[in-house]
Image (cartoon, helix red, strand yellow):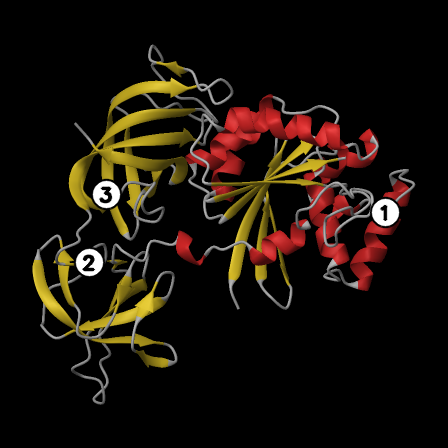
Amino acid sequence: MELLRFATAGSVDDGKSTLIGRLLYDTKQIFQDQLEAIERTSLQMGNEYTNLALLTDGLRAEREQGITIDVAYRYFATPKRKFIIADTPGHIQYTRNMVTGASTADLALVLIDARNGVVEQSRRHAFLASLLRIPHLVVCVNKMDLVGYEQEAFEKVKAEFREFAMKLDVADLTFIPVSALHGDNIVDRSPNTPWYEGASLLHHLEEVHIASDRNLIDARFPVQYVIRPQSDEHHDYRGYAGTIVGGVFKPGDEVMVLPSGFTSTIASVDTFEGPVDEAFAPMAVTIRLTDDIDVSRGDMICRVGNQPMVGQDIQAMVCWLTEASKLTARTKLAIKHTTKAARVMVTDLQYRLDINTLHRDESADALALNEIGRVTLRCTQPLFFDEYRRNRATGSFVLIDETTNATVAAGMIIGAGA
């Protein structure tokens, strides 16, 4: 069954957690004891209704303040699809949580309060979704019950958001009028919006086409582990285990191993269930080659005529994740890119991006917590990478502070450095 990962985003109090709670409740994904627990908590909090937001807001601080702070993951399934939801926080001081939570999403779900229209945070979340190259964007105009389910209110928000989205790289944009509190257009089409001719949210999530979003052209296989069983039965077995992050691999294909540049032919592609005729992203497999080549963790297997960029200098957009320090020119860090680890130095901070106005501040000399900017990095070893817009797996990385071992930045590669 196909898996869809989607992330929710929206301004504080736009109803993200309530919408997810409603989705889980109406698709019968809540156990009876869970429902009874949130009903009790709702009464204790003085709510006259069952507060479904409590299903995702699990931290005490979240419940006390009525906001989402950490990324909450929820899982559910329908007969058509399996889903993983990342409920990401809306507040600007938790930008890093949204960047990390939405980085693997196939679809972003942005909530907008029908009464307030497109606000600063709505624009910021739409920009982050486009920066993270999330292929599908769904705008849920929420709290339609508070504007009398008027089509005019919905169309106003739709026009306003479209105008801003024209500045972004958004391939697929859908608008749905909803009321998360009352369940309008969440699982079933609502009689309160007869003027709306589109699908309900769940129907759209079940039907949105994501198979072609993956890069099946550029064959990329970062080697994670070399398998050499020492048993008498498998004494001559030598396989390279990892997860395919792009393209298709089949026995008989001619491949190249980077960084050595040696070529060979795939002898077999093995999985836990046994050999397969072909494998593609995101399958975890073991590839055996016909020739004995020195291959180790961090190397990459690719096609001879379709290789990634190779280089020690990269240009990237970086989101700084820590308040313990700042990113400046000459900062030295460790980098984790696919299965390869190296050390890097920031050679240049080109600009800091104001994610609300999209203004580039070229006079900035540092990136602080939650700030995003464009940098040039110099690595101690060559990386094998693609542009993030072409392959999110080979185009992304994290930076690590070697003294504390803390992850301090998440990056998206724009291209090779100057």
Taking the spot 61% from the left edge, 32% from the top edge, the residue there is 90
Give the alpha-carbon distance from disc 3 to disc 2, as whole Å: 21 Å
Q: Could you tell which of marks 1 and 3 lies nearer the N-terminus?
A: 1
Q: Determine which of the numbered discs, if any, sits on residue 235 in the image.
A: none
The residue most toward the top is: 363
Quarter occupied by the C terminus: top left
Give residue 399's position: percent from left, percent from top: 34, 37
Relative to 82, is 47 above or below?
above
Other-residue count near label 3 (Cα within 10 Å), few / some / many at <14 / 14–19 / ≥20: some
Residue identifier under label 2: 302
Residue 32 shown left or right of residue 20 in the figure: right
Query: Residue 154: percent from the left, percent from the top?
Result: 70, 32
* Tag 1 near tag 3, CB within 8 Å: no
Among the two numbered marks 2 and 1 on one chain, the one whose residue lies closer to the N terminus: 1
Lower position in the chain sequence, tag 3 or tag 2: 2
- Residue 342 is tagged as 3
The answer to whether 66 appears left or right of 217 in the picture is right
What amino acid is labelled 3 in the image? Ala
* Mark 3 in CB contact with mark 2 (< 8 angstroms): no
Q: Give SS at disc 2.
A: strand
For label 2, the crowd category at 10 Å Cα-Cα, with few meaning under 14, some 14 to 19 and many 20 or more, is many
Q: Residue furthest bottom?
A: 233
Query: Residue tagged by mark 1?
Result: 50
Q: Which of marks 3 and 2 is in front?
A: 2
Tell me the SS state at disc 3.
Answer: strand
**Image check: 288 left or right of 284?**
left
**Most foreground residue, 59 or 193:** 193
Cα–Cα gap, marks 1 and 3: 51 Å
Gap in Å between the C-alphas at discs 2 and 1?
Answer: 53 Å
SS of the residue under disc 1: loop
